[in-house]
Every structure is written in C-alpha cells, then in structure tokens.
Amino acid sequence: MHWQTTRFVLDMTRPQVMGIVNVTPDSFSDGGQHASTTAALHHCEQLLKEGVDILDIGGESTRPGSPPVALADELARVLPVVREAVRLGVPVSVDTYKPAVMQSVLDLGADIINDIWAARQSGAAQVLAAHPRCGICLMHMHGDPQSMQAAPMDGDAVPQVLSFLELQALNLKALGVEKSRICIDPGIGFGKTVEQNFSLLVRQRQLLTLGYPLLAGWSRKSSLGAVTGLPLKERLGASVAAALLAAQQGASVVRVHDVRDTVAALAVWRTTQNFI
C-alpha cells in the first residue's frame, strides 16, 4: 500500500512516524514551546535528527474545550513555518480544517492536509479535489472541540467510525480524488470515552477493511492517563506502547510528540517481525 502526497509516494508497508509541530500557544501537550517560527523550525530540525518520516504542522489547538482560531492568526502562525519546512526533504503535513489555510499551504508545496473535520467544512472538499496529488487524512470527530468531551458519542464506536470514514472518503472520490491520496484516522480522544478509544485500538483492523492506510494518534492522550494514572508530562512509556500496539494492529502512520523513542521502539518491533 502506498499513500500519494504532493511530492512523495509514501510506502505504507513500514509504519511512518509523523512528528507533531504545534505552532500554538495553547496546545494540550506542548503549547507555547514552539509558538515562534524560529522555535518551530528548530523543532522540525530536531525531529529530523530523531528519525521522523513526516512533519505535521498545526496552528490551532484542538484540545477539548479549545476555542477556534481566527483565519488570519492561523495563517500567520503556519505559513512562515511551512515555507521553510518544505525545504527539509521530508513530507510536510498541515493540520487544518480551513479551506483558505489548505489552499495557502498547498500553494507553498505542502504534501498532506490533515483535517480533523474530514473535509466537512464548506469548501474544504473542493480545495482538496482541485489539487492533483496532495495527501489527505480524514479524521472522525464526534461533535466539535468545544463540546466533544462534554458529550461523547454513545454505543459501539467502531461501526460508527467506520461508516463515517467510508462516507467521507466516498464523497471525496466522487469529486475526483484518487483513492491513493486518502488516509483515515479514527480520531482517538475526539468525542469518545476511554472505553471507546481502546475498543478502536483493539478492533482497529476492522477499519482497515475500507482499504485505506490508517493514522493513529495516541500520543499523550487523556485515555492513557486514565488507565495509568500518569499526568500529561509522564506519559512517554504509555504513548510509545500505544503507538506500537497501533502498528501491530495495522496502522500505517503513528502521529507522536516523542519521535526518538517511538522510532527506536518501532525498530525493535520491526526486527522481531523478521523472525515470525
């Protein structure tokens, strides 16, 4: 399986490590640490040294309860970083749901649009369809960032997530988007209970029946804190364990804060696969 992006065709037979670059003052995990362009680019370079495969740049926090960011503010945060990051030799993903931001970063050469709204915002699908090659990640979210954890979804999450992602992918394909450009994300922590999040991990292979590569984003999530009792800054081990379990269950991309440790853990896991 391969994932077509603007400049790269990514081999999905080996789990890709997507490193998080939050250009925000209020992200749940590292808000403010990389808020300036200089700090964000330094972080990109550090992640490259640690073995990152994809850089994921975001200018708006999507933590539970976070307010939306004005378009002008998101552009001001993201564009200077993307302009330089596309020169670093790895795929650049931009975490945004705003069509104007999508168009602007694609004009700069960004490779992937990582959309928590799964192209449901007005005009988003059209921007993505108009681009000939960019990669697209469609994520499931119940509700919106302001309310999603106050009123999480009911019932068995797996069939609901599968049905939603199938529909959103079909909508893009109806606009002419090639299947090879699409990746799916079950949206761990986005309007789901702890039990629902772990059911999506255990039964992740059911989502793979759709035929798209899958991105798993477990890094430092509150569900890991719920089962370990560990605070945010102490969830490295739990985050790496969740990334490995996701890879074992067929995830093609793991989106993480802690690149070096995840890369090392995946290297050990891949080595063991040679003996099976």
Image (cartoon, rainbow, N blue to C red):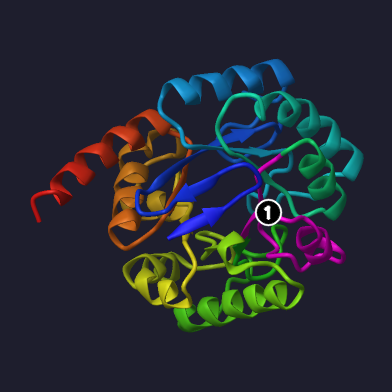
Residue 221 appears in view? no
Q: Foreground residue, 11 or 150? A: 11
**Residue located 37% across and 44% down the image:** 239
Residue 37 part of the magenta-drawn span: no
The answer to whether residue 132 is left or right of residue 158 is: right
Query: Up-down: is 259 above or below 125?
Result: above
**Residue located 76% across and 59% down the image:** 128
Residue 19 appears in view? yes
Q: Which residues are magenta?
A: 110-137
The answer to whether residue 179 is left or right of residue 242 is: right
Q: Foreground residue, 39 or 124? A: 124
* Residue 100 point in image, percent of width and height: 87, 49
Quarter of the image with the N terminus is bottom left
Q: Foreground residue, 230 or 38? A: 38
Helix or strand or loop: what does disc 1 sit on?
loop
Residue position for label 1: 133
* Residue 178 point in image, percent of width and height: 64, 67
